[in-house]
Image: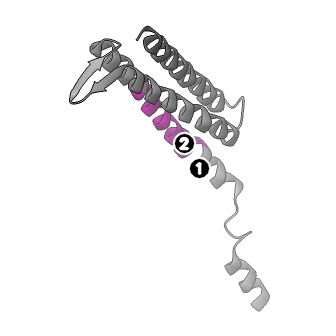
C-alpha cells in the first residue's frame, strides 16, 4: 500500500513536470526562440506524456474492491491534484490554438502570393 502511494506521487510529479515543460516549450515558441512548428512537435509528445502519467496517478491513487472505492491518496487531494493538471493541460491546448490563429495563419498569408502559385493563373497566362 505504501509503495503504491509513493508510485502515485511519483507519477503525479512527473505529470506536473511534463505540463510545466510543455508550457516552457509553448512560451519559447510564442517568443520566437524556436519556430512554432518545432515547438508544436516538441509540445505534443510532452503533453501526451503528462496525460499518460496523470492517468497512472488516478489509477494508483484509488483501489476498487467490488463496488467500493478505497482512496490510497486522500479523495480531496486526488481530485484537486488531478483537476489542476487537467486545467493546465486544457489551457496549454487553448494557447496553441491562439498561437496558430494569431501567429501561424497571418505569417502564412504574408508569405503567399495568390496569383503566383495557383493553377488558374498558369492556365490564364498559357491561353493568352
Q: Residue at the location (73% across, 69% down)?
A: 117
* 75 or 123: nearer the viewer: 75
* Residue 63 against residue 9 in the figure, above or below: below
Label 2: how many Cα within 10 Å (few below 14, some 14–19, many 20+): few
* 50 or 1: nearer the viewer: 1
* Residue 62 against residue 121 in the figure, above or below: above
Would you say residue 128 is visible in this rendering? no
Q: Quadrant of residue 61?
A: top left
Q: Quadrant of residue 39?
A: top right
User: Is residue 98 located in the magenta-colored stretch of the structure?
Assistant: yes
User: Is residue 58 located in the magenta-colored stretch of the structure?
Assistant: no
Local SS, label 1:
helix
Q: Residue furthest top?
A: 2
Span of residues in magenta: 86-103
Classified by dominant secondary structure, the portion drawn in magenta counts as helix
Local SS, label 2:
helix
* 116 or 92: nearer the viewer: 92
Would you say residue 47 is visible in this rendering? yes
Q: Quadrant of residue 82?
A: top left
Q: Is 59 on the left-hand or right-hand side of 38?
A: left
User: Which residue matches tag 2?
Assistant: 102
Pointers 2 and 1 in contact (C-beta within 8 Å): yes
Circle on res. 105: 1
Amino acid at each position: 500500500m505504501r509503495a503504491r502511494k509513493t508510485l502515485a506521487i511519483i507519477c503525479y510529479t512527473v505529470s506536473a513536470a511534463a505540463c510545466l515543460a510543455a508550457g516552457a516549450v509553448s512560451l519559447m515558441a510564442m517568443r520566437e526562440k524556436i519556430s512554432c512548428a518545432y515547438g508544436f512537435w516538441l509540445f505534443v509528445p510532452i503533453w501526451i506524456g503528462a496525460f499518460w502519467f496523470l492517468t497512472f496517478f488516478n489509477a494508483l491513487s484509488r483501489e476498487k474492491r467490488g463496488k467500493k472505492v478505497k482512496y490510497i491518496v486522500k479523495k480531496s487531494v486526488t481530485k484537486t491534484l488531478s483537476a489542476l493538471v487537467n486545467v493546465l493541460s486544457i489551457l496549454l491546448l487553448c494557447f496553441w490554438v491562439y498561437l496558430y490563429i494569431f501567429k501561424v495563419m497571418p505569417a502564412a498569408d504574408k508569405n503567399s502570393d495568390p496569383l503566383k502559385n495557383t493553377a488558374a493563373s498558369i492556365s490564364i497566362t498559357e491561353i493568352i
